[in-house]
Image (spheres, rainbow, N blue to C red):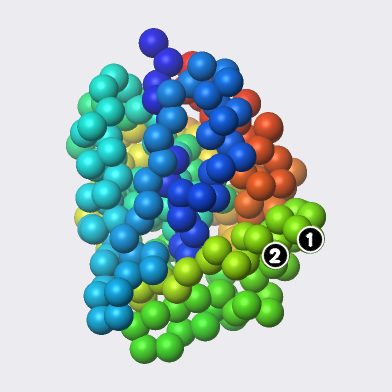
């Protein structure tokens, strides 16, 4: 029985970022679900953290029968690491150019291990967002101009709380994982991704920028379909 693929987006994005991948998976007869994380675009004064984002993922997992392949992109890796802990219905985790924290480690601490800076992030009060002048080059460098413009316009501010919130138990300690290294990534450089990839059971190199769901949806869908079948 093939697993249902559950897709978890990263910071500033939403489930819209998977819009090219979802129909490709469906054509391969792969069941797929997406999640919108509450830490992206919350009302003023509201600070959802990793716990709330993981709860949103858990709700989708609980409502979906059978085995689930859980894929997290970028910040979404932090979320799936928490959401899958202790579950018997998630046979594999896929980290797509994603943060992969240790037990008790926050996203900030995990990135600190890799040397990633993030000078393109703007923080004001309890909100953070990518510098609009640099977002296209950082996230969508290998996409066409039309895709870049449309995607940047859909990015939303994010609460700052998740950045420093630790993940109590790293699910990948007990659940087999695959890390997808995006070798042309300008948001999380490939060398930084390889620090995380060494923690995974196996890894795959994908010649892509940070957003293969836009630049290489066919290759990503094929990869996820194979992981779900396995």
Q: Quadrant of residue 130?
A: bottom right
* Residue 204 seen: no
* Residue 46 seen: yes
- Horizontal side of residue 155 vs 105, given as left or right: right
Instruction: State the residue in front, 61 or 50.
Output: 61
- The image's mark for residue 177 is none
Position above or below: 80 against 203:
below
How many neighbours does mark 2 have within 10 angstroms: few (below 14), some (14-19), or many (20 or more)? some
- Residue at left 37%, top 52%? 36
Position above or below: 18 against 46:
above
- Residue at left 46%, top 49%? 15
Q: Secondary structure at mark 1?
A: helix
> Could you say where residue 165 lies in the image, as x and y percent from the top left?
28, 67
> Could you say where residue 205 lies in the image, as x and y percent from the top left?
67, 39
- Tag 2–tag 1 contact (CB < 8 Å): yes
Q: Which residue is mark 2?
A: 149
Position above or below: 37 against 204:
below
> Could you say where residue 8 lies in the image, as x and y percent from the top left?
42, 46
Q: Which residue is mark 1?
A: 145
| Placement of the N terminus among the 4 image quadrants | top left
- Residue at left 54%, top 44%? 18
Q: Give how far apart the Cα atoms at labels 2 and 1 are.
A: 6 Å
- Horizontal side of residue 37 vs 95, given as left or right: left
- Horizontal side of residue 80 vs 230, given as left or right: left
């Amino acid at each position: 029985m093939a697993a249902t693929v559950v897709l978890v987006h990263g910071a500033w994005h939403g489930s819209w970022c998977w819009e090219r991948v979802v129909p490709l998976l469906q054509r391969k007869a792969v069941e797929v679900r997406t999640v919108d994380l509450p830490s992206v675009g919350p009302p003023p004064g509201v600070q959802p953290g990793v716990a709330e984002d993981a709860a949103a993922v858990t709700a989708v997992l609980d409502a979906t029968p059978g085995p689930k392949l859980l894929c997290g992109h970028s910040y979404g890796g932090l979320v799936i690491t928490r959401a899958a802990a202790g579950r018997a219905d998630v046979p594999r985790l896929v980290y797509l150019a994603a943060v992969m924290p240790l037990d008790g480690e926050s996203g900030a601490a995990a990135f600190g291990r890799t040397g990633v800076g993030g000078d393109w992030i703007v923080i004001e009060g309890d909100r953070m967002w990518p510098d609009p002048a640099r977002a296209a080059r950082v996230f969508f460098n290998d996409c066409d101009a039309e895709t870049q413009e449309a995607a940047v316009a859909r990015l939303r501010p994010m609460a700052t709380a998740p950045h420093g919130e630790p993940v109590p138990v790293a699910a990948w300690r007990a659940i087999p994982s695959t890390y997808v290294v995006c070798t042309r990534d300008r948001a999380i450089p490939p060398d930084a991704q390889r620090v995380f990839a060494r923690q995974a059971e196996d890894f795959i190199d994908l010649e892509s920028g940070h957003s293969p769901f836009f630049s290489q949806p066919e290759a990503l869908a094929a990869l996820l379909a194979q992981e779900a079948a396995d």
